[in-house]
Amino acid sequence: MKAVVLRELGGPNLLKYEEVELPKLESNEVLVRLKYASLNRRDVWITFGKYPGLKLPSILGADGTGEVVAIGDKVEGVKLGSHAVINPALNWGENPDFNGPNFSILGMPTDGTYAQYVAVPCENVSEKPNYLSWEEAAALPLAGLTAYRALFTRGGLKKGETVLIPGIGSGVALFALQMAVAKGARVFVTSSSGEKIEKAKQLGASGGVNYRSDQWVKELKKVMGGADLIIDGTGGENFINLINLAKPAGRIVNFGATTGPVPHLVLPRIFFKHLDIRGTTMGNPHEFQQMLQLFDEHQLHPVIDQCFPLCEATQAQRYMEKGQHFGKILLEIP
């Protein structure tokens, strides 16, 4: 089969499109003939060696959709020919509140979806929602699951609350916007791009500001007031501003640190406001099903920015690195 393989570290240019052997099925696994895969920021980080548990060579890619073409002899509940969407959260563990020690994400160290075929445990395969295209369904799993858990399990979102989502345009941020709006929240966003803010408004955001403005915090407070819930994947220096923007007794849920560590954190700003700051990542199998049900109930459609052929995975990752996309970046599998 054709696959995109990472054999050495140093960035996306070292990805190789080549012929590899078909995956060998374990007794509890299914083989999926993939139609589309979706990029995530972790894919780029892995190529630079900036991700824990590195194992090479690896076929990258956490997200994918396709048809089940073979099943192991102990598989139950999955039929040949099923239209599958893959949950990339492997071996979550027994406690729904946090992942166990054997947890990993599909696409390194386990070979992933930048390939024509992938083998996954049968419990990680769900039926693709009928109303979603193959492309849309492939865009959903990792980012959709992360956003769902951040909003509802960790964030405790309630109807009518005010939500702030910094750095709109990434997959998680957009899914959080769509789900929060669907649940009756008032959502505000930030971006360095006025065009992205306008696109977010078209998806239901109540407003937004450009964080490159010297007065962006004051501008946002003027239009938003304070935030009951902030969903943050950026970290860095702006995290201090998020503390200022949170209402007393507000919640900040963080799932990433794309702009680096938080410097000079002043604890009294947290405890005098009675803030909850919570961490989260990915989600458990039940949350994955709840996320799919929410999308189905509200007929939400993932935002897709661009689709590349599988053989252009390097170009796709380079495009992601620029950070100018709005929505998910896909790979079409030949």
Image: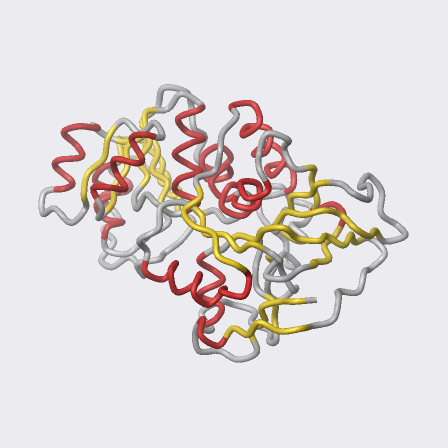
Q: Which of the 4 quarters of the picture holds residue 219?
A: top left
Rendered location of residue 324, percent (x, y): 31, 53
Q: Is residue 273 in view from this perspective?
A: no
Residue drawn at the location 57% of the way across and 46% of the way down: 138
Looking at the rendering, in which quadrant would you find the N terminus? bottom right
Rendered location of residue 189, percent (x, y): 28, 37
Q: Please, is residue 121 above or below residue 17 in the view?
A: above
Q: Please, is residue 244 above or below residue 58 in the view?
A: above
Horizontally, residue 214 falls left or right of residue 97, namely left
Horizontally, residue 180 falls left or right of residue 61, namely left
Tell me which colouring the rendered structure shows. Answer: secondary structure
Q: Which of the 4 quarters of the picture holds residue 190?
A: top left
Q: Is residue 283 in view from this perspective?
A: yes
Residue drawn at the location 52% of the way across and 26% of the way down: 299
Horizontally, residue 120 falls left or right of residue 140, namely right
Horizontally, residue 244 falls left or right of residue 278, namely left
Rendered location of residue 76, percent (x, y): 85, 42
Residue ranking furthest to the left: 214
Q: Please, is residue 27 above or below residue 191 in the view?
A: below
Q: Please, is residue 53 above or below residue 239 in the view?
A: below
Total labels: the figure holds 0
